């Protein structure tokens, strides 16, 4: 069972609805994971792109 497509669709929907807060949350989580794993150099390329209001 493949949940990749529905999941990415959901992420797109959520980021579209609450873009700034969602983006900030993902950035925070990415930072915490990076800090834990000591891989700060890896860019968060998977972050959704947000249009400026």
Image (spheres, rainbow, N blue to C red):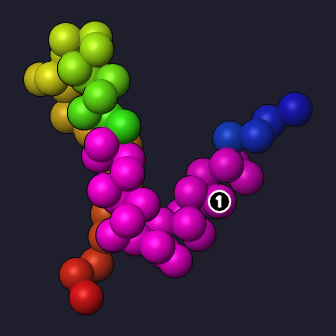
- Examine the image and state in which quarter residue 44 appears: top left
> 19 or 7, which is in the foreground?
19
The answer to whether 45 is drawn above or below residue 40 in the figure is below
Q: Is 16 in the magenta?
A: yes
User: Principal SS element in the magenta part?
Assistant: helix
Quarter of the N terminus within the rendering: top right
Residue at 12% in and 23% down:
41
Q: Position of residue 25 (x, y in %)?
A: 37, 51
Residue at 29% in and 28% down:
32
The answer to whether 31 is drawn above or below residue 12 in the figure is above
In the picture as drawn, the residue positioned furthest to the left comes out as: 41
Residue at 47% in and 66% down:
15
Q: Is 20 situated left or right of 7 in this image?
A: left
- Examine the image and state in which quarter residue 45 appears: top left
Quarter of the C terminus within the rendering: bottom left
- The residue segment tinted magenta is 5-28
- Examine the image and state in which quarter residue 42 appears: top left
Residue bearing the label numbered 1: 10
């Amino acid at each position: 069972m493949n949940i990749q497509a529905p999941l990415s669709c959901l992420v797109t929907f959520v980021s579209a609805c609450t873009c700034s807060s969602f983006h900030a949350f993902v950035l925070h989580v990415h930072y915490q994971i990076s800090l834990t794993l000591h891989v700060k150099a890896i860019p968060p390329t998977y972050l959704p792109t947000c249009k400026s209001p």
